[in-house]
Image: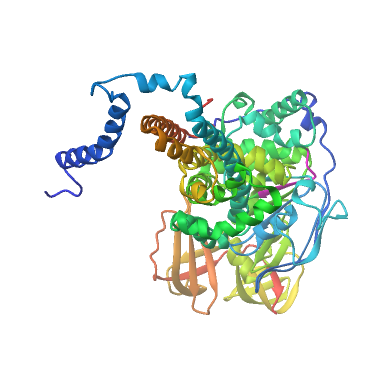
C-alpha cells in the first residue's frame, strides 16, 4: 500500500473484531436476563419481575442507591459549574501563566487509581463525617475530584473557541460587573462545554463503584452488587438499563458537541 | 463582503442620541507610569484632552499607546500617576463604573445576542427598561446606518458591519469618553477608510471626547484634532496633524509619520541654504545652523551630475498608486523622502541625484 492509514477492508476487520469484543458480553447478559432456569428456554418473567410488588424489598438497595446517585450527580454538577468553571475563567483571564500547572493538577485524578484515592480520602471523610454528617451527598466532594479531568477538557475546549478576554472586557466597559459577565456574557458562549461537562459528570457519577464501596456509601453501583448476590437476573437487568442510560447520555453529549452557540436560533 | 455606501444620517430631532449630544468631558493623564514586572512600558505620560476633542495616540507596536488607553479604561491599573475624567480622579474606579464606551481591535460583539440586544446591553446594565433600551438601541443603529440589521446575529455580519455595531453599542449609553483601540485594523482598505470617516463624522455630531489608538499615520492624520506620537513609552510630540506634517519634533516622528525629511541647512534670516539651494523660510526666521523639514513633494529625483544638489543611494521605493515614494540615503548621511511620478522607476541601490524645489520650508535651530 502506498497510502497512509488502513484500507477499507482492514478498517472493517478491526471494527468488527472490536465490536464483537464489546458486543458478546452485552448480548450474553441480555440473553441471560431472558433465560428460563427451569426449561432452558426464553422467558420474560425476569423483566416482568421488576414490577412485581412482592420483589420490591429485593430491589430496595438499588432504588436507594439510585436515589443517592442522582443526588450525588446534581451536587457534582453544581461543583463543576460553580467551582470549576469560575476557577477556569479566573485562571484563563487573570493568571494565564498558571494554566499549565492548573491543567496538570486537574488531570491528575485520571492517573491515580480510585483505590489509592480512597486511602487518602478515608481520613478526610472521617473529619467530614464529624463536621457535617455522613449523608450520601458528601461523596460529591470526592466525585468532584474524580470528574475534574473530564469536565476540564470539555470546558477548556469551548473556552479556547471563544475570545473570553475581549468579551469580558467589552462587557466591563459597558458597565457590567463580574457576576453579570460570568452569567450573561461568558456562560451563554460556553454553553456547549458546560453542558458536555455536566453530562459527562453525571455519567461518571452513575458508574462510580470503588470509592463509594470502600467508604461504605450506598450508591447505584453498590446497590447492584448487593442485589446480584441475591438475584443474578436483577443485577444483570439493572446493569443493562444503566448502560443504556449512559449510552443515551453520551449520544446527547455528542449532539451538544456538534452544535454551535448562537447559531441555533438564527 | 463590502459595505454599502453612502449612508445618510437620520434627522437630529428624531434621534435621541443626537438630540442629547452634549459638551464632552475633559480627560487628563497625569504622570502615568506603567510597569510590567521590571519592564517600564509608560514613562510618566501627561496628556490633557479638551472636552469634545478627537485625539489619536499614534506609534509603532509596543510603544505603549494601547496600554495608555487601557489605563484610561481601567482595564489596567497604572503603577503611578492619575487619570482624571471631568476633573475627577478615577484611578480607583473600576472599569464598569467609569462610564466609558470602547471599541476593540478584535470583534467583540457578544455572539449569543442579536445585534439590537448587543447594543442594548449597556443600557440594560444601567437599569433602562426593555422597551426604552430597544428604542434607543434602534436609534444608535440608525446612527451607524445598520438599523435594518437589528435582528441579525453577529456571525451574519461582515467585519465592517460588526465594528459599526460595536461603535453603536459603545455610543448608545452616552458615555463621557469614547475609546477606540485600533478598531479598523482588521478591516480591508476600502471599508477602513469609509468607517474611519464615519467615526469622525459621528464624533463631531455627538461632540464626544474620543481617544483613538492607531499605528496608521494616515488614519490619524485624517481624523484627529490632535495627535500624540508615542515611542517607547513616551510622547515624542503632541500637536495638530498640520504640526506633525510641517514640523516633526524629532527624527523619530519624522520617520514614523513618514512625511518630512530632516536635513541640515544654514539659515540667513528669511532664507535657508540646503545643499547649495536657497529656499524661503516659512514662519519664524532663523540664523545659523538649522534643521530643515523637507516635504517629499519638494524633492525631485534627477540624474547624478551638475543638475543635482546632492547625491545618494536608493534605499527603498514604494509604489502607491498615482505616485511612488522613494527613500534615498544621502551621501551626507541624511535620509530623504522623495515623492515622484509612478512611472519614474528606480531600483534598490541605484545612485541618484536630488534637486530641491524652491518652496517655503520650516526650520528649527540645530540641537
**Residue drawn at 65 percent across, 34 percent down:** B118
- Residue at 47% x, 41% y: name it: A222
Q: Is residue A203 above or below residue B339?
A: above
Relative to A47, is A178 on the left or the right? right
Could you say where residue B151 lies in the image, as x and y percent from the top left? 60, 25
Q: Residue A111: which quarter of the image?
A: bottom left
User: Would residue A68 be found to the left or right of residue B134 on screen?
Assistant: left
Residue B123 at least partly seen? yes
Based on the picture, tell me whether residue B260 belongs to the magenta stretch: no
Q: Is residue B184 visible?
A: no
Total label count?
0
Counting from the top left corner in percent of width and height, residue B122 is at 73, 37
Q: Quadrant of residue B265?
A: bottom right
For residue B179: magenta?
A: yes
Say left or right for B336 vs A225.
Answer: right
Place of residue B350 in the rendered image (x, y in percent of width and height, measured from the top left): 39, 70
Q: Nearer the viewer, residue A25 or A46?
A: A46
Magenta segment, which residues?
A: B174-180
Amino acid at each position: 500500500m502506498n497510502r497512509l492509514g488502513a484500507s477499507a477492508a482492514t478498517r472493517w476487520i478491526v471494527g468488527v473484531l472490536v465490536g464483537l469484543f464489546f458486543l458478546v458480553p452485552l448480548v450474553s447478559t441480555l440473553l441471560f436476563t431472558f433465560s428460563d432456569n427451569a426449561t432452558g428456554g426464553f422467558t420474560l418473567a425476569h423483566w416482568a419481575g421488576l414490577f412485581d410488588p412482592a420483589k420490591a424489598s429485593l430491589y430496595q438497595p438499588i432504588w436507594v442507591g439510585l436515589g443517592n446517585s442522582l443526588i450525588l450527580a446534581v451536587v457534582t454538577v453544581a461543583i463543576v459549574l460553580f467551582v470549576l468553571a469560575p476557577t477556569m475563567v479566573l485562571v484563563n483571564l487573570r493568571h494565564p501563566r498558571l494554566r499549565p500547572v492548573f491543567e496538570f493538577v486537574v488531570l491528575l485524578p485520571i492517573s491515580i487509581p480510585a483505590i489509592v484515592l480512597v486511602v487518602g480520602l478515608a481520613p478526610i471523610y472521617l473529619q467530614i463525617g464529624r463536621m457535617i454528617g455522613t449523608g450520601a451527598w458528601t461523596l460529591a466532594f470526592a466525585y468532584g475530584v474524580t470528574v475534574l479531568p473530564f469536565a476540564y477538557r470539555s470546558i477548556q475546549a469551548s473556552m479556547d473557541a471563544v475570545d473570553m478576554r475581549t468579551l469580558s472586557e467589552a462587557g466591563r466597559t459597558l458597565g457590567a460587573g463580574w457576576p453579570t459577565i460570568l452569567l450573561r456574557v461568558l456562560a451563554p458562549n460556553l454553553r456547549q462545554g458546560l453542558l458536555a461537562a455536566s453530562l459527562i459528570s453525571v455519567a461518571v457519577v452513575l458508574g462510580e463503584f470503588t470509592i463509594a464501596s470502600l467508604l461504605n456509601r450506598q450508591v447505584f453501583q453498590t446497590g447492584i452488587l448487593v442485589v446480584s448476590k441475591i438475584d443474578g437476573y436483577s443485577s444483570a437487568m439493572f446493569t443493562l438499563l444503566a448502560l443504556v442510560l449512559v449510552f443515551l447520555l453520551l449520544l446527547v453529549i455528542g449532539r451538544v458537541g456538534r452544535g454551535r452557540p448562537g447559531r441555533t436560533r438564527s | 463582503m463590502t459595505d454599502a455606501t453612502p449612508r445618510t444620517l437620520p434627522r437630529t430631532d428624531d434621534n435621541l442620541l443626537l438630540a442629547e449630544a452634549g459638551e464632552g468631558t475633559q480627560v487628563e493623564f497625569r504622570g502615568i507610569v506603567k510597569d510590567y514586572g521590571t519592564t517600564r512600558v509608560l514613562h510618566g505620560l501627561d496628556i490633557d484632552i479638551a472636552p469634545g476633542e478627537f485625539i489619536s495616540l499614534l506609534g509603532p507596536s509596543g510603544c505603549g499607546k494601547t496600554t495608555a488607553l487601557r489605563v484610561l479604561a481601567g482595564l489596567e491599573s497604572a503603577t503611578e500617576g492619575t487619570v482624571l475624567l471631568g476633573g475627577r480622579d478615577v484611578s480607583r474606579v473600576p472599569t464598569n463604573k467609569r462610564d466609558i464606551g470602547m471599541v476593540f481591535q478584535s470583534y467583540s460583539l457578544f455572539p449569543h445576542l442579536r445585534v439590537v440586544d448587543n447594543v442594548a446591553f449597556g443600557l440594560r446594565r444601567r437599569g433602562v427598561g426593555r422597551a426604552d433600551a430597544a428604542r434607543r438601541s434602534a436609534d444608535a443603529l440608525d446612527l451607524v446606518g445598520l438599523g435594518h440589521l437589528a435582528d441579525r446575529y453577529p456571525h451574519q455580519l461582515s467585519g465592517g458591519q460588526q465594528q459599526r455595531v460595536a461603535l453603536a453599542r459603545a455610543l448608545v449609553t452616552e458615555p463621557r469618553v469614547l475609546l477606540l483601540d485600533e478598531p479598523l485594523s482588521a478591516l480591508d482598505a476600502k471599508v477602513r477608510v469609509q468607517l474611519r470617516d464615519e467615526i469622525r463624522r459621528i464624533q463631531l455630531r455627538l461632540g464626544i471626547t474620543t481617544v483613538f489608538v492607531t499605528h496608521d499615520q494616515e488614519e490619524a492624520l485624517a481624523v484627529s484634532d490632535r495627535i500624540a506620537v508615542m515611542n517607547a513609552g513616551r510622547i515624542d510630540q503632541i500637536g495638530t496633524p498640520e504640526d506633525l506634517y510641517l514640523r516633526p519634533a524629532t527624527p523619530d516622528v519624522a520617520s514614523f509619520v513618514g512625511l518630512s525629511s530632516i536635513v541640515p541647512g544654514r539659515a540667513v534670516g528669511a532664507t535657508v541654504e540646503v545643499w547649495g539651494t536657497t529656499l524661503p523660510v516659512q514662519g519664524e526666521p532663523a540664523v545659523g545652523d538649522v534643521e530643515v523639514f523637507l516635504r517629499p513633494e519638494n524633492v525631485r529625483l534627477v540624474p547624478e551630475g551638475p543638475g543635482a544638489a546632492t547625491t545618494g543611494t536608493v534605499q527603498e521605493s514604494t509604489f502607491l498608486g498615482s505616485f511612488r515614494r522613494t527613500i534615498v540615503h544621502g551621501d551626507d548621511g541624511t535620509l530623504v523622502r522623495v515623492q515622484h511620478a509612478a512611472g519614474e522607476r528606480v531600483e534598490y541601490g541605484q545612485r541618484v541625484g536630488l534637486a530641491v524645489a524652491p518652496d517655503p520650508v520650516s526650520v528649527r535651530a540645530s540641537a
